[in-house]
Image (cartoon, rainbow, N blue to C red):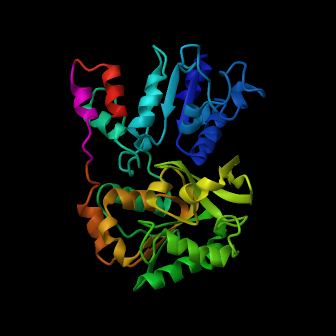
Amino acid sequence: LVAAARALGLRAYAAAHSEDGRRRLAELLDARGGGGDGTGADGPDGDPDGGPGPAAVTVDGLLAGREGPGRDEEGAYALDLLAVLDAPQLDTERAAMLVEALPDGARLVLSGDPNLLGAAGAGQVLADLLAARVCPQVVSRTPDPGPVGELVSGIGIGELNQVEAPGREVVIVPVRDAGEAVHRTVQLVADSVPRALGVPAGLTQVITPGHGGAAGTRVLNAALKERLNPGPGRFGGFDPGDRVVYSPSPGHTAPGTVVSGDEEGLRLDCSGRAVTVPRGRVARTVRHGWAITAHQAAGTRWPAAVVVLPGDAVPALDRAWVYTAFGRGERHLSVVHGVDQALPRAVAQLPAPERMTRLRPLLRAPAATAADIGRAAWR
C-alpha cells in the first residue's frame, strides 16, 4: 500500500513500534521501490520521485519528530497516508497523539494481528475499532512458514498441536522446578542453540511471564549475565556488552546494548541509535535484557527464542500470552516447560481478558466526533 501510494506521488509513510519492525519495513519497501531507507524510489538523498525521505519510521520517532515528514505550521504531519503496523500495541495516549496530528484528508491504516498481546499502556484501540465495525476491515493473514508458524497458527485458534520439526525448529525441554528451568535456559542460550542451529547467544531472546519469581527476568538475567558477560557492574550495575531494555516511559521499551558509562550517565546502543541515560534515571529505566517479558518482546522477532514456563507462571498464562511469546522466534523456538497441563488448558480455554474502555461505545455513537474520541483517549 505504501509503495503503491508513493509511486502515485503521495506522501505515504509506514510506522512500526520497534526499530526491528522499522528495519523490516524498510527492507520490504526498498524491494518494492518504495524508498524504505532513503534509497529505492526515493533516490540516494531520499527525495525525488518517490516521496520525501525514508518511508519506514517508528511510532516514537514520528511522535518525537526524529523521523518522518515533520509538521506544517499548524502542527499537522506533512503526509497523505500513514500505515501503523503492530497496531495492537497502540495505546490510547499515542493513538490520540497520532490522530490529532493528521491533516484533513489524510488516511490512517492500522494493521496488526488481533491475537497478540495488547498495549502495555491504557486502552485497546485496535480491538475497539474492530468491535465497533465503523471502519473498513480487510482480513489478510499469511501464516509464518515452517513448524514454528504451524504451532503459532494453531494457538491462535485455541489448539496446542504437536508439530513435526525435523530441523529442531521446535524443542520442548521439560523441567521439574524453577532452579532447573534457570539452569536449562542458560544452557540453551549459551551452548545448545549456538551449537545445534548456529544462532549466537546475542540473537537468542529469553521470554518469561514476569520480572519476579524464582525464574523471572531478574533471576534469569543474573544467571545469563554471569555466563555470557560477567563483570562487576561498575556502571550502576551494568557493564559494557550487557544486553538491556530501556524504558523511557511506562509501557515503552527498546532493546539495547551497554556501550559505556561515565559521569553523564549510561551510554546505550539501541538498535543503532545512541542513547545516554542520566545516572539518576538508570535504576528506574534500564534493566538487563537477555530475559524479558512477552509484553516487552511484542513487536520484535529474533532468530531464536527460548520461552520459560516455570511452575509459578500458571496464573499469568492465557492464549494471547502464549501466542505472542511463541511467535517471537523466526527459526527456532525452545520451550522450557514446567507447567504440565496448564499450558494446553490456557491455550484452549483462556483467551486474553477483555479490557473495559470508553472508546468502543463512543465509536458506535452516531454523534461522536473526532474531538470526542480524542478526549476519551486522553482520559
Q: Nearer the viewer, residue 352 or 220?
A: 220
Camera sees residue 366: yes
Q: Quadrant of residue 157?
A: bottom left
How many numbered discs sit on the rendered protein? 0
Q: Position of residue 23 (x, y in %)?
A: 63, 43
Point out residue 22 in the picture as x, y percentages from the top left corner. Answer: 60, 41
State left or right for residue 269 relative to residue 350.
Answer: right
Q: Residue furthest right?
A: 44
Q: Quadrant of the C terminus?
A: top left
Q: Tell me if residue 290 comes above or below residue 102 in the rendering.
A: below
Q: Check if residue 207 falls in the magenta segment.
A: no
Identified at 41% across, 62% down, the residue is 151
Question: Measured along the vertical axis of the image, is residue 367 above or below residue 253?
Answer: above
Residue in view at x 60 percent, y 44 percent? 24
Give the residues drawn in magenta, as a range: 355-366
Question: Of 143 and 362, which appears nearest the observer?
Answer: 362
- Residue under the point 34% across and 41% down: 123
